[in-house]
Image (cartoon, rainbow, N blue to C red):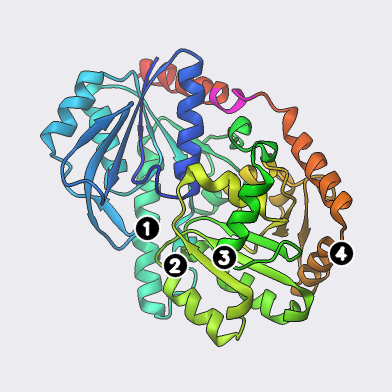
Amino acid sequence: MKIAIFSEIYLPYLSGISSFISVLRKSLISLGHEVLVITSSTNVSSTTFEDGILRCPAKSANNKYGMSLKNSNNQTMLKKILEFNPDIIHINTDTAMGKLGLSIAHRLGIPTVYSIQDYYEDRFFYENSKIKLKIGTMVEKSRLLDMIDNCDVITASSGRAHEYLASSGRKDKHIRVIPSDTDISSFNYQNITPESIQKLRKKYNISPDTTLAMFAGRLDTDKSVEYLLQEWAQFISVSDNMHLMIVGDGTEIDSLKDWTKYLKIESQVTFTGEIPHSLMPEYYAASNVYVSAATTGLMSMSVLEAIACGLPVLLKRDKYTQEFVKEGVNGFTYEKASEFGDRMKQLSSLDIDGRRIIKNVVRRSRNDIPSDNMAKQFIAAYESAMKKKSKH
C-alpha cells in the first residue's frame, strides 16, 4: 500500500504529532508499505525531498503551530506527490496542509483517513478577549468539522472523540479509537550512560541528588503548563530539593517564562527551548518523573516516550487518563494541586534502589505491547476507507 501522510509539522519540530507520525511511518515501512510524509517547514526556502519526507516552505500563521503551508500550488510539491501516486491519504491537521491532502485525494479519487490530533476549544485555552475567543472557536470548529465531514474514516487516540463529536452534532460519525504508541527500542534508559546523564544535569546546573521532574512538548495553550507552574509554586519549595524542566518551544513560551517570574520560582524551573527529538531519550533518562497538568483527553506521545524510558508519570486526572496510566504501575494521577505536591514528595523520598525498581516496573509495563500494534490498526483503518470509497 502507498500511503501519503499530511501534517503541518514533523521532526525535528518537537511535538506529539511529529513523534506520532515518525513512529507510524517507521512501523508501516517495516510492514512492507511505502510512505510519503508531506509537511511544511520554516527552515526551507524551497521544496526538499529526502528519505521519504517532502518538506515545503511555510509562512507564519495564527495557529497552534505558528506556521502554515506557504503555497498549495507549489508545482514541485504537487509533482512529487502525484509521482508517488498514493493509494490513500492520511491527514493529521485541519490547516492548509490538511486542505491540500483533501484536494489531492479528490483529484486522484482516493480515500482519506483523518486523525484528530487536538480539539478546537483547547486551542484558545486562555484567550483574554471573549469576542476573539468566540470567533476563534467558531473558525477552528468549522475547520475541524469540515475535515471530519469530508474524510472517509476518522481516528482518535482517545475515547473522548466520541462524546466530542456527539456534542458537535456528529454523533452518528464512527470513530476508530487507535491508541498511540512509541518506538520502545529508541527510548530505553539502559542505552543512556551515567556519564551522559551527569553531563546533561551539569549543563543545566542540576545536582545529581535533586529530584528532576520534566514536561516535554509544544508549549501551546492546550498543554496547561501555566497550571503546572502554579501547582509547583504552591506546594514545592526550594528546600524540597526538586527542579522542574520544561522541554520544548511554542507560542506560549514567553508568557510561561513571565508567569514563572511572577510566581517567584525561577530558581526551580528551567526552560530548555527546542531539543532535537533524537536527544530526548537522554532528557527522559536524566529525569525522575514526568509531569503534566493537561486534561485534553488525547494520548500524549511524550507521556508514552517517558514510560518507555522507565519514567513514572504524574498526570492531572480525568476520565481518560486511565486509558494509558496504570495507577501505581507506570505512574500516578492527581485531582487537587495538594495531591500533586504530596505525590512529588513521595517520589522524591525514594532512595537509589527504590528509583531503580520503579524504572524497571514502568519500563516493563510497555513490553507487552507489540511494536507494530498501532500500524496494524491504521492499516485496518486504511482498508476500511478503501472499501467505503469503492461503494460510492
Instruction: Say the numbered circle drawn on residue 349.
Output: 4
Q: Amino acid at mark 3?
A: Tyr
Residue found 82% across the figure and 61% down from its top: 347
Q: Secondary structure at mark 4?
A: loop
How many numbered marks appear?
Answer: 4
Q: Which numbered disc flags the more N-terminal residue, 1 or 4?
A: 1
Q: Which numbered disc flags the more N-terminal residue, 2 or 3?
A: 2
Query: Percent position (x, y) of residue 93?
Result: 38, 45
Asked if the residue under mark 3 is in contact with the one under mark 2, i.e. CB atoms within 8 Å, the reply is no
Q: Is residue 12 above or below residue 48?
A: below
Q: Amino acid at mark 4?
A: Ser
Q: Amino acid at mark 1?
A: Glu
The quarter of the picture where the N terminus appears is top left
Instruction: Say the numbered circle drawn on residue 140.
Output: 1
Instruction: Say the numbered circle drawn on residue 124.
Output: 2
Q: Which numbered disc flags the more N-terminal residue, 3 or 1?
A: 1
Magenta segment includes 374: yes
C-alpha distance separating marks 4 and 2: 38 Å
Q: Amino acid at mark 2?
A: Phe
